[in-house]
Image (spheres, rainbow, N blue to C red):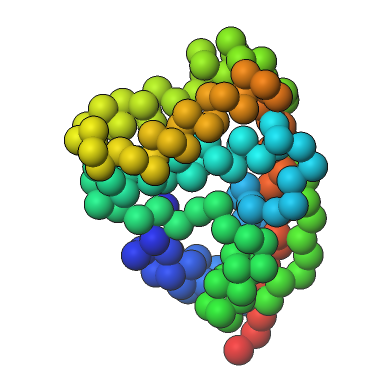
Amino acid sequence: MEEKIFDRVIEEVYRVLQTHGKFLVIDKIVCEFRSPSEELTVLTELAYHKAVEYVHGIRVWGVRRAEELIAKIASKNFTEKSRELITLGKRFSWDEFIENWGRDTLRLMQAIPGEARGGLEELVNRIKTNVRKYGYGPARVIAALFVKEAT
């Protein structure tokens, strides 16, 4: 989701929910990773977000620390009721990863002039190197439940 509309989306969710209505957020988060393959699930998201920003000028809201996500939503008058870290997905080998990942990121990278790719190309190469070495996934996500309290 575009960073500049994130607040408006959360405000709209709040507006349309009835009092005591529930809002469930499930998203990848930056955390202390248990393995290099788990960290790669976040690095791939960051690479995609950076490619979108370079090519389209769109800053994407996503892949934040759990506390930042919770605070952002709570700042829109939601009350957090629960949160849990959940492991989703499966582990992919190098071959499976290359088959399933990066089409959009790599396509976007081609639209970026070579000299401007710098950090993004470095990140994509780091991802490829680490996937060969460790595999990819599964991902840890946060499932956070919020409630619209009576005002």
Q: If the image is split into quadrants, where does the C terminus sit? A: bottom right
Q: Give percent across and percent down for residue 40.
A: 62, 35
In the rendered view, would you say 39 is above or below 68? above
In the rendered view, would you say 83 is above or below 110? below
> Hey, which quadrant is residue 111 in on the image?
top left
Question: Which residue is rendered at x = 45% and y = 57% of the image?
Answer: 61
Can see residue 48? no
Q: Give percent across and percent down for residue 112.
A: 23, 36
- So how many labels did they put on this image? 0
Question: Which residue is rendered at x = 61% and y = 74% of the image?
Answer: 71
Side (left or right) of 13 relative to 144: left
In the rendered view, would you say 67 is above or below 52? below
Side (left or right) of 38 relative to 126: right
Question: Which residue is rendered at x = 64% and y = 53% of the image?
Answer: 30
Q: Nearer the viewer, residue 67 or 82?
A: 67
Q: Give percent across and percent down for residue 131.
A: 62, 24
Side (left or right) of 135 relative to 111: right
